[in-house]
Image: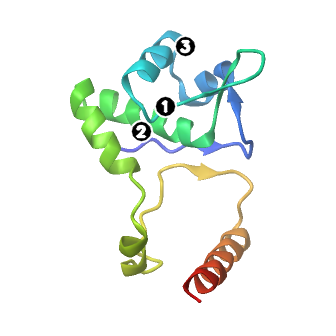
Amino acid sequence: MLETLEIPNKSTFKLNEVCGLTGVKPYVLRFWESEFEEIDPITSSTGQKLYEPRDIEAIVTIKNLLFSEKMKIEQAKAELSKRLAAPSYEEEEMLSEEEIPLPPITRMGLSNSDIDKLVMAKNLLQEIVSA
């Protein structure tokens, strides 16, 4: 079963925030950083690691693969790259709005009208690119 998590609407998170959100201990998170290339925190000018929402999505997925689905690290690496791989432009064109897989994590602050606006903006941008 996929764990769902609401990520606060922020661009970056400190280590202790990520650990609090995901329930992963700092030493485990540091180990996963060395094993999974999908977790790639930014280093600030002061040397502090800052995690983006995509890093948190990867962490939650890894946690699910290792603990819920009982995969070994090598299996989880292969499965993670499949699950987090963004569809290519051609693949995305072939999917209808209902078929596009939604991530297991929802972001706080996005209402249905916000999502509708984003879909409209995406469609307008696609029209501009194809023109």
Q: x%, y% of residue 92?
A: 42, 72
Q: Residue at x 49, y 15 (%)?
A: 30
Instruction: Tell me whether the residue at label 2 lies in contact with that at label 3, contact meaning CB atoms closer than 8 angstroms.
Output: no
Instruction: Tell me whether the residue at label 2 lies in contact with that at label 1, contact meaning CB atoms closer than 8 angstroms.
Output: no
Q: Residue at x 42, y 57 (%)?
A: 86
Q: Residue at x 59, y 89 (%)?
A: 131
How far apart in space, not on screen, are marks 2 and 1 (Cα)?
A: 11 Å
Looking at the picture, which amino acid does disc 1 mark?
Answer: Ile
Looking at the picture, which amino acid does disc 3 mark?
Answer: Pro
The front one of 51 and 64 is 51
Query: What residue sits right under mark 3 in the picture?
Result: 26
Q: How many marks?
A: 3
Looking at the picture, which amino acid does disc 2 mark?
Answer: Thr
How far apart in space, not on screen, are marks 2 and 3 (Cα)?
A: 17 Å
Q: Is label 2 in a helix, a strand or a loop?
A: helix
Query: What residue sits right under mark 1 in the picture?
Result: 39
Q: Is residue 71 visible?
A: no
Query: What residue sits right under mark 2 in the picture?
Result: 61
